[in-house]
Amino acid sequence: EVQLVESGGGLVQPGGSLRLSCTASGFTFSSYEMNWVRQAPGKGLEWISYISTSGSIKYYADSVKGRFTISRDNAKNSLYLQMNSLRAEDTAVYYCARIERYFDWLSSYFDYWGQGTLVTVSS
Amino acid sequence: QSVLTQPPSVSGAPGQRVTISCTGSSSNIGAGYDVHWYQQLPGTAPKLLIYGNSNRPSGVPDRFSGSKSDTSASLAITGLQAEDEADYYCQSYDSSLSGYVFGTGTKVTVL
């Protein structure tokens, strides 16, 4: 059974940093591209970052570019999100999500999601 | 500021058919990028409902169907059931933003 378990969320002050982790099981982690998607309280879903299977290719949404860094450790079946210079608008539940290609990377969809971890940015 | 627009809410009585639209533009759906749909039950993570415009993953009832045309896509739920009460999101790729994009979300209420 595919499982994705996020951890590392919590309360942080504006300008602070936090590192989220996502531990995968039930599939060959190193064979799948991974993403982070967030959802602000009462709001919709927002894709924020993608990482290739090897970790050599990374993409970010403009809203987090330059502040967040995605990474992975295939030996540990783990995905990470380093979040720096946090702002109040970064308050959200953060989900790690596996993607599956339909035809190519551009047609990919999120086939498995973790349960999410809440990040609250407030003083 | 999602680039895919959905109606905020739709409702229907048990057994009825409801449809949810997802309207995009020439940089996403209109450019030929595929559309996928997710169901998010209250307090839970999203779940894949439709992929590749009209394909259902194993385990998803055939009451759910998807279609795509020009710059928009639609999700139809036939034989509406109480357990279908949830938020629904469309998703595609946007070439102007160089990333994946989600719709604004639609809350389905079963009357």
Image (cartoon, coloured by chain):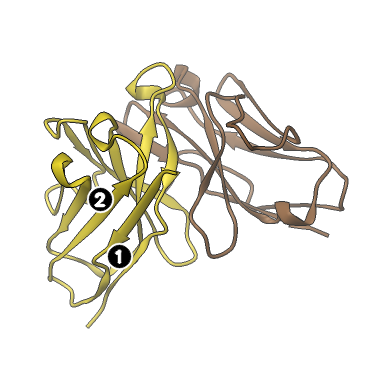
Q: Chain of mark 2?
A: A
Badges 1 and 2, same chain: yes
Residue B69 at what x, y percent from top left?
61, 20
Residue at (58% x, 28% y) in the render: B72
In front of the other: B90 or B27? B90
Residue A72 seen: no
- Chain corresponding to yellow in the figure: A
Tell whether A67 sits left or right of B79: left
- Tell me if residue B31 comes above or below residue A79 in the rendering: above
- Tell me if residue A81 comes above or below residue B58 in the rendering: below
Residue at (71% x, 37% y) in the render: B61
Q: Which residue is mark 1?
A: A89
Say which quadrant the N terminus of chain A sits in. Answer: top left
Tell whether A46 sits left or right of A72: right
Q: Quarter-wise, where is residue B58 in the image?
A: top right
In front of the other: A49 or B83? B83
Around disc 1, counting alpha carbons within 10 Å, would you say few (fewer than 14), some (14 to 19), or many (20 or more)? few
Residue A66 at what x, y percent from top left?
11, 49
Residue A41 at what x, y percent from top left?
44, 67
**Badge number at residue A63:** 2
Residue at (60% x, 25% y) in the render: B55
Question: Mark 1–mark 2 contact, CB under 8 Å?
Answer: yes
Mark 1 is on which residue type? Answer: Glu
Tell whether A15 sits left or right of B87: left
In front of the other: A32 or B72? A32
- At mark 2, the secondary structure is loop
Mark 2 is on which residue type? Answer: Ser
Marks 1 and 2, how far apart at CA: 10 Å
Around disc 2, counting alpha carbons within 10 Å, would you say few (fewer than 14), some (14 to 19), or many (20 or more)? few
Per the rendering, the colour in which chain B appears is brown
